[in-house]
Image (cartoon, coloured by chain):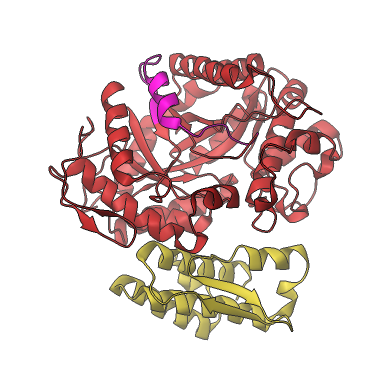
Amino acid sequence: MKFGLFYEHQLPKPYGKDQWDPDQEHKLLKNALDQVELADSLGFDYVFEVEHHFLEEYSHSSAPEIFLAAASQRTKNIRLGHGIALMPPRYNHPARVAERIATLDLVSDGRVEFGTGESASEMEMGGFGVRREEKKMMWEEATRECVKMMTEAPYSGVEGAYVGMPSRNVIPKPLQKPHPPLWVASSRRETTMVAARLGMGSLGFAFETPDEAEERVANYFQLVKDECFPIGKAVNPALAVLSVLSCFDSDEEAIDKGMEGAQFFAYSLGYYYNPFTGGNHKPGEMNIYSKFIDTPPEQRWGPLGEGFRGFGGFQGAAVTEEPKDEVTRALWRAAQRGGCIGTPDFITDTLRKYEAAHLDLMIFVAQCGARKHEDVMDSIYRTGVKVIPEFKERHEQHQRWRGEQLEGLEYPVNSSI
Amino acid sequence: MPNKLERINDDALRLSLTDAQTSLRSGNFSDVVHRSSDAYVEMLRRDPELLKGPLGMRRIMFFPRLGARLVQEQDGTPTIIYDRETFIFSEAITYFEFAVDNLIKEGL
């Protein structure tokens, strides 16, 4: 199993204030670059960065290609993932995406992972005039054409439902051939099976438990082998899931420094992605963090209610018998939902279950909510030194398992796993 | 691991979704969306308890809205509204997998 970091660039407003402090966004991005540089030096394999627009406090990451380009010049080995680039053409024309991906691939010496997606929040779709009922159609068409633009010289052109372009040679071309590994954001379970059938990696932003992951891995690889019609010129069989990370020398410290940020992540996600109320946000006027802090802790997992309480919101594991002790209960809840909040030993135990389920990549959300930069750095450092090494030692076994699963696959594979 | 469809116990629903899978393989994506949506609605109609409370809200809310929508009529009956009749591969897969997963989850 490999490991990555995931960036939303969360930036809560100071409690009770209408606006951020003047230098907050600047510090946020510079700190994140320091974190990525540290992760690279410790052997983390990937950094993935989202593309979101207008989601104040939840995500200040609207230009991931710029951040990743900066990261590429401060790192040596870590792979640079779009997690994801928004593909409906109203967000980004596919030719512009192809140009940016290729350029980043060149300046990073071939380290790009091309994650794609379509977005789901009313704030973003409404802002760019993307209709919910058409967004997946836009994604599929634009992604298909974008890959052609990266691989055809010249691109043959298209008159599609959403992309119209005459023949042009879209340059530069990416360093990785035929193109960087392809991924799709799989915030819904069904999209993992879309990924399999299109030969794409699945970026599972849905915070699965190890048991859920095991079933999904088995189904995914079966479909890749039996029912795949690749959207690109090579397939990227790969399954990634997200987990919150807070790694410290004691459970109490991990919870103290990490739990509120994890809860804010879930709370703000629910705030923007609730299909009934997500569009009610008043731009520039709200302070989501203040609302979150004023919410009783037991309700902070999300504004949508008990059924949505799991970290990440929508896929919480069944809650049956919770331990009575507060610290144990918090850890148990985090573990039930795939969370990595605790000591290196606790996190290692949790990750071994994902490894046993043959998960390819665990992506950590280390920066979230109002977590302090120093704590994020500590947590990354401790994970890199005390957790990741034993998994690296066993990765060859996983690669052999992958080889067995993919034996007989009739398409070329381009995967960094 | 057995084919997921084999885990659907109800003969009629399993047959309908098996036909949907055949349509998916042959490129008849509209048929996939119709069969999958119908199967999901049939599940909800058989057991009105499934539409009650917060979990009931989720069952409506998380139905894909990619050209076919799940709504409740005034008397609460779930029904599908089609905004269009043409669907693409990824949309068809989404409706198909959603229906299969939920039927299995509810033990049908």
Is residue A58 among what the camera can see? yes
Q: Quadrant of the N terminus of chain A?
A: top left
Q: Residue at 31% across / 39% down in the picture?
A: A96
Q: Quadrant of the C terminus of chain A?
A: top left
Colour displayed for chain B in the image of the structure? yellow
Colour displayed for chain A in the image of the structure? red
Residue A96 on the magenta segment: no
Q: Is residue A209 left or right of residue A43?
A: right
A244, above or below A210, in the image: above
What residue span does the magenta drawing correspond to?
Answer: A57-80
Q: Is residue A370 left or right of residue A350?
A: right
A163, above or below A34, in the image: below
Instruction: Out of A160 and B107, give the one closest to the viewer.
Output: A160
Instruction: Out of A343 and A341, give the one closest to the viewer.
Output: A341
Instruction: Out of A88 and A340, give the one closest to the viewer.
Output: A88
Q: Residue furthest left?
A: A153
Quadrant of the image occupied by residue A164: bottom left
Residue A400 is situated, as x and y percent measured from the top left of the image, at: 32, 38
Give the total of numbered labels: 0
Residue B53 is situated, as x and y percent measured from the top left of the image, at: 78, 67
Residue A58 on the magenta segment: yes
Residue A31 is situated, as x and y percent measured from the top left of the image, at: 56, 16
Is residue A417 among what the camera can see? no
